[in-house]
Amino acid sequence: MAEEKNLFKIAQLQLDEAAKFLKLEPKLHKLLREPMRVFKANLKIKMDSGKTKTFSAFRVQYNDARGPCKGGIRYHPEETLDTVKALAAWMTWKCATVGIPYGGAKGGVVCNPKELSILELEKISRAYIRAFWKYVGPDIDVPAPDVYTSGREMAWMLDEYEKIVGHKSPAMITGKPLALGGSLGRDAATGYGTVICIREAAKHLKIDLKKSTAAIQGAGNVGGWTAKLLQEKFGTKIMAISDSKCAIYSENGLNVEKALAHKEKIGQLHGFMGTKCITNEQLLELEVDVLVPAAMENQITKENTRRLNCKILAEAANGPTTKEADGILKRTKIFQIPDFLCNAGGVTTSYLEWVQNRMGYYWKLDEVNSKLDEVMTKAFWDVTNFAGKNKIPMRVAAYALAVQKVAEAMKLRGLA
Ligand code: NAD
């Protein structure tokens, strides 16, 4: 049978496994297998050429039993509604895992940002808000950046939203630039949270990160910060890091800061001094202590799982591992930090940003990071201890804890 690569089907299969473990009532299980609301729009954009082009856009609100929906917006040429639905489901479980008072949502626009001018990107971002403004807001659904969006897009979206509603509303979106009410630490937060999970996993496995090696797939927001913080905070040797074009490798370890500066300057990692170019597939199979897929989904498959050569698999990307690969991983000694635990640092600091916006008082970086550390460390041990106690894989443990919390909120509201 062909390997399942549809992210939403994978998310449903993962939920089914947890529901079986929890003996979840069938009615509730059925409700949790589908999103609560799906919005679609065609964004008509006047391009720089003068021609009009239409872009498909989505917003999926998966579940809001625990609080307002929360989730990023992706700009990607291969974005599909099913991908957005899966990501919205994972946001629901993620917020529950770390115990922040949000439900889950996700958004996307099918477009290739690499082929768009800044003006065209601004028009798409503003059009997205004009299409969905009624369904987002600080107490309804709070967007944030994701793949190929950043503070720049959030600023355009906030501005468009405030123009429509006629008042300031910084808490309607997170991941904003600092000048518009963003939080210190938000930019690095997903990488920071990943590194906190790796730190705790290393303690659990009695691995000394100072004497360890790591390979990072992806050099964007998450991959870049994870690599940088692992190197800076723990002295871990970064053997390889990649972007969509190639992976750079050095047997002596590479200087992450300089490699990222090289990418910033010339647009790619390729050609960074003292490194050789390997493929993204080869990077995943390197013999390292810590492997961090931090780019796209479906990277660890039934085809390559047996060739993984790491002790800790820190899933910083969303959905990097297929269901079949999970089945194989269960039988190995690799310690897996499941995606919606591993990458929950971003939404946790987004929550801290939302809290600061609502009270109108802003914390120093140390305060934000120490709150993030507390939340991530607790979530890591909640999941790890539950997995150990019940002798179940880490992903099933994370799901079971999260689904229980969402189910309880639904029952209390009389929704199930
Ligand atoms: P980004 O756009 O900043 O970076 C993506 C990186 O992946 C880039 O370096 C790009 O070159 C690389 N890439 C793209 N296609 C690739 C491929 N086929 N092979 C290898 N590398 C490839 O995105 P990001 O925000 O760093 O997000 C990365 C992952 O982390 C995604 O799965 C995203 O959903 C997840 N995530 C992001 C956040 C966040 O706060 N940004 C939070 C949670 C999860």
Image (tube, helix red, strand yellow):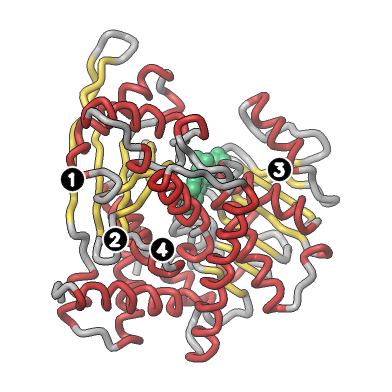
Kindly identify which residue carries mark 2.
67
- Location of residue 369 in the rendering, given as x and y in whole percent from the top left corner: 61, 54
What residue do we see at 40% from left, 34% from top?
A: 154
Which is closer to the viewer, label 2 or label 3? 2
Cα gap from disc 2 to disc 1, whole angstroms: 19 Å
- Location of residue 130 in the rendering, given as x and y in whole percent from the top left corner: 21, 30
What residue do we see at 83% from left, 38% from top?
A: 274
Choose the circle earlier in sequence order: 2 or 3.
2
> In the rendered view, would you say 236 is above or below 405?
above
- Work out which quarter of the rendered image holds the C terminus and state it: bottom left
Q: Decide if residue 326 is on the left or right side of residue 72.
A: right
Q: Are marks 1 and 3 in contact (CB under 8 Å)?
A: no
Choose the circle earlier in sequence order: 3 or 4.
4
Cα gap from disc 2 to disc 3, whole angstroms: 42 Å
Choose the circle earlier in sequence order: 1 or 3.
1
Which is closer to the viewer, label 1 or label 4? 4
Cα gap from disc 3 to disc 4, whole angstroms: 37 Å
Please tell me the numbered disc located at residue 39. Answer: 1
What residue do we see at 78% from left, 40% from top?
A: 275
**Amino acid type indicated by mark 1:** Phe
Other residues around mark 2 within 10 Å, as few (<14) / some (14–19) / many (≥20): some
Other residues around mark 3 within 10 Å, as few (<14) / some (14–19) / many (≥20): many
Kindly identify which residue carries mark 3.
248
Q: Are marks 4 and 2 in contact (CB under 8 Å)?
A: yes
